[in-house]
Every structure is written in structure tokens, then in C-alpha cells.
């Protein structure tokens, strides 16, 4: 190996060691700071102090539709109160429902996203400033694990669960209201990106001798009018669907933090790839003239 090659190798080795020792920990610190901000947005409860979480009221409605209006109270990951007014189609009757005082509904999407953020922070915390990374592959492995948790967290907020109509009809949510929901009304709450959504389905029972072609539908986030299902030997058809939503600002903040964190992870992986360890550099074969 020529003297020039040895110098080049020494420089590369010094640069790569600096990357592993200094730059990686600098990025990990940035990631922790961003994800701690994200975790604060989730209002993580302290055991025994859940009642101290801030309650936020959100008004659900639409300027173009007044069939459904409501006020939802969100406390961290739980809906602690829901007050819903439903104007029944083809009549002027207004039905009013609210959660029973002893009930609250956990939004599983928020709970799951929060848990993935906690796991990402635990991964980062297991490699504090005293930890010495040995190889680029080790850094990439950590970044991949963190990115997996962040992607799962984001996906939980951007991808509501698909449910069948019988699953909605038999959901515990239907037993939370006073007065009890009538048999021809179903509701569902879910998160979609930074929005808290309420969907109300109005149903009618299909006569047993109906000649209408009965085709039960599968699972979906949002079912359309005309969708059919069977429950307890009765056949139903969705006659009306009402969807109202509102923006939850801290969920929007959280999604932004996820994007920033994923970008930081990818940028570090790119740096590791472009600054390979000296032993990973290809060895130049001597030419015939040098032999």
C-alpha cells in the first residue's frame, strides 16, 4: 500500500470514528428531543393522577349538514363524554344521546400510537452518550428499529380500523349511551390523521320476504348507504350515513414530529452509507506496471 493510500485510509478511519462517536449521538439526542415533544402531546398520564389530564371539548358538525351535531370531550386517549344530537331522516324528530356518567371510550389508535413512541424512546435511551457504536451496521440496525416504531405509530393515526357492520352493532360503544341507542342507529368514533371522526348510521330492517337481492358487505372504515348485513336472524340495510369531524391540533403536531423523526433517521443512515468504514473500502489491485 502506498503512503498516499495509507494517509487516505487514516483520514477515512478518523472521519468514520468521529461519525460513530460524535455525529450519531448528536442525532440520537435530536431524535429524543423531538419524540419527547411528541410524547407530551399525547398527555401521558401519571399512574394515579389520570384525573389531572386536561379535558378538551370538540364541537362536531358541518356547515352543509345539520343532521348530526355533537360535542366530544377528549382527555388524553379517552373520550370521557359524547353528547350527540341526531335529526331523524324523513321526520323532524331529534334524538339526543350522551355517554353514561360511569363510561368512557378508549381510542385504541391514540393508545397504540403512544405506545410505539414510548418504545422508540426506550430504544434510543438504551444507547446513551457513553455507548460506543462499533460499526455502521449497528447504527443502521438501531435506526431501522426506531423507524419501524415511528412508522407503526403514524400508521395507527392514518389508518382507522376496518369493521363490519355486525361488529359495529355489537361493539361495547353501543352500550355506553343514555338513553340507550335504538336498534336502528349505530355510531363509530375513530381517528383519521389529525381528525376526530364520528359516523352515525341509520338502518332499516329488511322484511323477511323481501325480494331485494341480499348481499352482506365486508369490513370498511366507512360504510355507504345501501350496505346490508345480518344480525340475530334479522337483515338490515343502511339507509343514511352521517359523518362529522373536527381537527385535534395536538394530533397534527404529533404527525409532524413523526415526519421530522423519520427524516432524521434516514439522513443518519445515508451518512453512514456514504462514509463507509475503512475496512469496508475496496482494496485497489496493483497494476501490471506497479508489480
Image: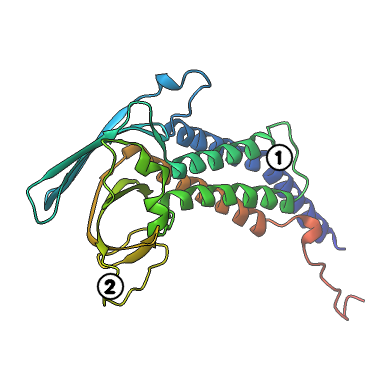
Q: Residues within 10 Å of mark 1 (few under 14, many from 20)?
A: some
| 70 to 262, vertically: above or below | above
Q: Quadrant of residue 97?
A: top left
Residue farthest left in this picture? 92
Q: Position of residue 26 (x, y in %)?
A: 60, 38
| 173 to 263, vertically: above or below | above
Query: Can residue 252 be seen from the camera position used here?
Result: no
- At horizontal 51% and vertical 45% (from top left) the residue drawn is 261
Disc 1 to disc 2, how far (Cα)? 76 Å
Q: Is residue 81 left or right of residue 255?
A: left
Residue farthest bottom in this picture? 288
Q: Is residue 288 left or right of residue 248?
A: right
- At horizontal 7% and vertical 48% (from top left) the residue drawn is 92
Q: Residues within 10 Å of mark 2 (few under 14, many from 20)?
A: few
Which disc, if any, is residue 209? 2
Q: Is residue 1 left or right of residue 225?
A: right
Secondary element type, mark 1: helix
| 178 to 281, vertically: above or below | above
In which quadrant of the rendered image does the C terminus lie?
bottom right
Tags 1 and 2 touching, CB below 8 Å? no
Which disc, if any, is residue 40? none
- At horizontal 52% and vertical 52% (from top left) the residue drawn is 151
Q: Nearer the viewer, residue 122 or 7?
A: 122
Q: Position of residue 264 (x, y in %)?
A: 53, 48
Q: Nearer the viewer, residue 22 or 38?
A: 38
Residue farthest front in this picture? 209
| 89 to 225, vertically: above or below | above
Secondary element type, mark 2: loop
- At horizontal 45% and vertical 30% (from top left) the residue drawn is 40
Q: Quadrant of residue 80?
A: top left
Residue labelled with disc 1: 21
Amino acid at each position: 500500500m502506498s503512503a498516499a493510500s495509507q494517509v487516505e485510509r487514516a483520514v477515512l478511519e478518523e472521519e468514520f470514528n468521529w461519525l460513530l462517536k460524535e455525529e450519531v449521538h448528536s442525532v440520537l439526542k435530536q431524535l429524543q428531543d423531538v419524540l419527547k415533544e411528541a410524547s407530551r402531546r399525547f398527555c401521558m398520564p401519571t399512574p394515579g393522577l389520570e384525573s389531572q389530564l386536561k379535558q378538551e371539548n370538540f364541537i362536531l358538525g358541518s356547515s352543509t349538514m345539520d343532521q348530526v351535531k355533537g360535542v366530544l370531550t377528549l382527555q388524553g386517549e379517552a373520550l370521557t363524554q359524547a353528547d350527540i344530537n341526531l335529526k331523524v331522516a324523513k321526520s323532524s324528530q331529534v334524538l339526543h344521546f350522551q355517554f353514561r356518567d360511569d363510561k368512557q371510550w378508549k381510542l385504541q389508535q391514540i393508545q397504540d400510537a403512544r405506545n410505539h413512541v414510548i418504545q422508540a424512546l426506550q430504544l434510543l435511551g438504551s444507547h446513551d452518550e457513553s455507548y460506543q457504536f462499533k460499526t455502521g451496521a449497528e447504527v443502521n440496525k438501531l435506526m431501522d428499529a426506531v423507524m419501524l416504531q415511528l412508522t407503526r405509530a403514524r400508521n395507527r393515526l392514518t389508518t382507522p380500523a376496518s369493521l363490519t357492520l355486525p361488529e359495529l352493532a355489537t361493539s361495547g360503544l353501543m352500550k355506553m349511551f343514555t338513553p340507550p341507542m335504538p336498534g336502528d342507529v349505530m355510531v363509530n368514533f375513530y381517528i383519521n390523521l389529525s381528525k376526530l371522526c364520528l359516523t352515525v348510521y341509520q338502518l332499516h330492517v329488511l322484511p323477511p320476504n323481501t325480494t331485494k337481492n341480499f348481499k352482506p358487505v365486508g369490513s370498511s372504515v366507512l360504510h355507504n348507504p345501501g350496505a346490508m348485513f345480518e344480525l340475530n336472524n334479522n337483515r338490515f340495510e343502511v339507509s343514511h350515513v352521517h359523518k362529522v369531524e373536527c381537527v385535534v391540533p395536538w394530533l397534527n403536531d404529533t404527525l409532524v414530529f413523526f415526519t421530522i423523526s423519520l427524516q432524521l433517521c434516514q439522513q443518519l443512515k445515508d451518512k453512514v452509507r456514504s462514509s463507509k468504514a475503512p475496512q469496508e473500502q475496496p482494496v485497489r489491485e496493483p497494476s501490471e506496471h506497479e508489480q
